[in-house]
């Protein structure tokens, strides 16, 4: 790995992403944008449309797609175990433990990981990333909802369950699966497919702008041991876990490179939203998003440089 390769990766892959994030930051500073509205547009409209369209478009075979999803789940579980070990060692209170788990397990595979993978490896790699995004979204709005909910009573559990069932991303996955299994050609229905395709194409830019607004409105907490632990797991340990799993599962190097790169994505914005919605440690969650996103300019550049050298 040469300094020239690292500089090329920073300028060609990472800086375009952070430039769009910066536009969102500047716009919010100038016009004080409504973050909640932007998030709802992403979660309830653009992400479900993207998942539905890309699942129907991707040429990835069923068996290989299942292996990609299994690898992603494995990385999430091991990252969660690491966070639990660290939380016990540092004697964190329950709310902080859950926030640490959220920050460690759920990466920003949509508005950060998707453009990163596309710029780094091309549109073919996006077919792999779609299944990573599906797993991350479904997991975030199922297990993540229960994890973010600090209440242990039956009412809290029912609230988490109803919140999960309201997430359209889950139904987008189910609808795409049914269409594929039944061989229904939705793409032939122009009046339905064209609007969905337009919305899917709008996700990356809108999501990056939303991330910039989120960073602009974040007042990060000081960097202390719990927060440093979350950053270490998310940005450093998770790619190493992904490398071990992809090696054990014998993925082809191009597919393994996508999974390793996206495993080191910064903490997902949705984790801060879940913490806010369900009374978690919002300061810790937003600080994890803030610092991990900024540091990812360095860590993803280094990660990608090593991966490109590895796959030639």
Image (cartoon, helix red, strand yellow):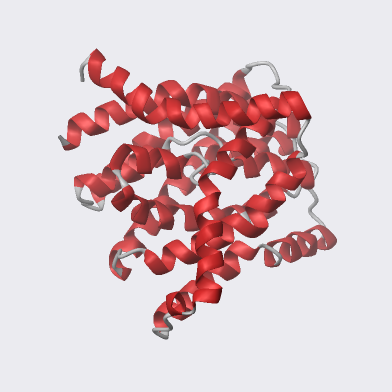
Whether residue 307 is visible:
yes
Vertical placement of residue 221 versus 20, above or below: above
Quarter-of-image position of residue 159: bottom right
Residue 177 in percent (x, y) is at: 46, 75
Classify 194 as above or below 11: below
Q: Residue furthest bottom?
A: 182
Residue in view at x 72 percent, y 38 percent? 94
Residue 21 spot, x, y in % from top left: 56, 30
Relative to residue 30, is residue 21 drawn left or right? left
Measuring 60% from the left and 28% from the top, which residue is drawn there?
23
Quick one: quadrant of the N terminus? top left
Above or below residue 164? Residue 251 is above
- Judge by depth and name the residue closer to the eye, 55 or 261: 55
Q: Residue at x 37, y 42 (%)?
A: 117
Residue at x 58%, y 23% (from the top left corner): 291
Front residue of this view, candidates 290 and 66: 290
Q: Which residue lies furthest to the top in this view?
A: 3
- Give the answer, above or below, for where 2 lies relative to 106: above
Quadrant in the picture for residue 11: top left
Instruction: Please state, as top left, top right, bottom left or bottom right, where the C terminus lies in the image.
Output: top left
Which of the two residues, 162 or 241, is positioned nearer the viewer here? Answer: 162
Q: How many marks?
A: 0
Residue 81 x, y percent position in the rendering: 51, 42
* 180 on left or right of 152: left
Residue 84 appears at what percent x and percent y?
A: 57, 38
Residue 218 shows in the view: no
Q: Left or right: where does residue 60 sit relative to residue 24?
A: left
């Amino acid at each position: 790995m040469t300094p020239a390769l690292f500089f090329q990766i920073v300028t060609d892959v990472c800086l375009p992403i952070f430039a769009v994030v910066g536009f969102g930051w500047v716009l919010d500073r100038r016009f004080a944008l409504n973050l909640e509205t932007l998030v709802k547009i992403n979660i309830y409209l653009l992400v479900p449309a993207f998942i539905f369209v890309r699942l129907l478009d991707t040429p990835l075979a069923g068996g290989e797609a299942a292996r990609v999803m299994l690898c992603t789940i494995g990385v999430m579980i091991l990252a969660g175990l690491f966070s639990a070990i660290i939380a016990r060692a540092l004697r964190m209170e329950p709310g902080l433990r859950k926030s640490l788990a959220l920050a460690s397990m759920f990466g920003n595979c949509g508005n950060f990981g998707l453009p990163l993978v596309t710029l780094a490896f091309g549109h073919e790699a996006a077919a792999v990333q779609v299944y990573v995004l599906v797993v991350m979204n479904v997991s975030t709005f199922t297990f993540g909802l229960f994890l973010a909910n600090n209440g242990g009573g039956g009412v809290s559990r029912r609230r988490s369950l109803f919140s999960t069932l309201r997430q359209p991303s889950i139904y987008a996955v189910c609808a795409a699966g049914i269409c594929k299994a039944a061989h229904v050609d939705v793409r032939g229905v122009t009046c339905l497919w064209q609007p969905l395709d337009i919305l899917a194409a709008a996700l990356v830019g809108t999501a990056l702008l939303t991330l910039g607004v989120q960073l602009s409105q974040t007042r990060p907490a000081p960097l202390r041991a719990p927060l440093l632990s979350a950053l270490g797991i998310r940005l450093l340990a998770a790619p190493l876990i992904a490398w071990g799993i992809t090696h054990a599962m014998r993925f082809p190097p191009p597919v393994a490179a996508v999974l390793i790169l996206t495993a080191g994505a910064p903490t997902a914005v949705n984790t801060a939203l879940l913490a806010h919605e369900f009374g978690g440690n919002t300061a810790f969650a937003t600080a994890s998003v803030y610092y991990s996103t900024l540091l990812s300019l360095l860590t993803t550049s280094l990660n990608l440089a090593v991966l490109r050298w590895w796959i030639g």
